[in-house]
Image (tube, rainbow, N blue to C red):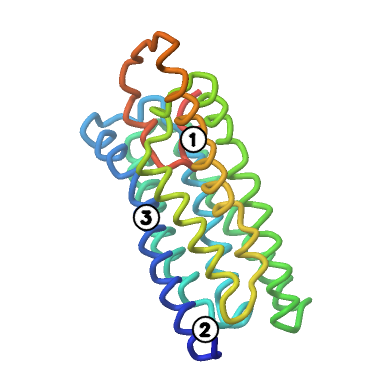
Amino acid sequence: MTHGAEALARTIIGIIGNIISFSLFISPAPTFWRIIKKKSTEEFHPYPYLASVMNCVFWIFYGIPVVHPDSVLVVTINSVGLALELIYLCIFFIFTNKKIRITILLFLVSEIVFLAVIAVITLLCFHTHETRSMFVGIICDIFGIIMYASPLSIVRKVFKTKSVEFLPFWLCLAGFVNGVVWFTYAFLKTFDPYIAADPFSWYHCSTSTSASASASASAFTSAEIKVTTAPPPPPELKLPLFYLHLHRN
């Protein structure tokens, strides 16, 4: 594949990744519509959205030209994601109690300060794109590991119950395709190890594969085991995979 063809393929794959990622970012919207209608955040927590803000901010920083050139599509989707997460937090802020409001503000201020510190270190201590990309990319992947490792408990629940109701098929499929798309993107034109290693991609791939395996096991055992139909999961269990574990105690 010629350099020009590879660059075109990378752009097309990146646009597809943007579209799929947007569908995952927008999927909590029904939950916030519920919050608006009930004028209450009930037992929901703001922490997944605060964590997502941090994640988006660092990937935006990673994609700017002074850190990692030719990463426009990484910046675009994370900018959209950041805007959506801030909208979700604003809605949460309006309808939650005073204690949680203070928590949200403290988290946001801490994130801004932390980003400023990392930005200063990046620009003053590292003087090439390679070293800056390495420093910021490692931080992005570390935050990804912290954010996306815990929801694997949902997979354990799927295997235990032999039910995929906690991992809706269309979200599993979208997450799996999203992971494959961004992993492919990382190998085109110039290899990007930090996007390739991004736990967001690998989490969705592993979760979707596990859910599929559980569904297969359920299909084989359903003829021998009496299946008890569980009540439909509450709406918040149908959120994107990377939000599932953080909304309730």
Mark sitting earlier along the chain (2/3): 2
| Residue 127: percent from left, percent from top | 75, 83
Which residue is denoted by mark 2 in the rendering? Answer: 6
Camera-side residue of 106 and 159? 159
Q: Residue at x 33, y 25 (%)?
A: 234
Which residue is denoted by mark 3 in the rendering? Answer: 84
Dot 1 amino acid type:
Ala
Left or right: where 229 falls relative to 245: left
Q: Secondary structure at mark 1?
A: helix
Mark sitting earlier along the chain (3/1): 3
Q: Nearer the viewer, mark 2 or mark 3?
A: 2
Q: Secondary structure at mark 2?
A: helix
Which residue is denoted by mark 1 in the rendering? Answer: 211
- Callout 3–callout 1 Cβ contact below 8 Å: no
| Residue 15: percent from left, percent from top | 39, 71
Residue situated furthest left in the rendering: 37
Q: Residue at x 25, y 39 (%)?
A: 33
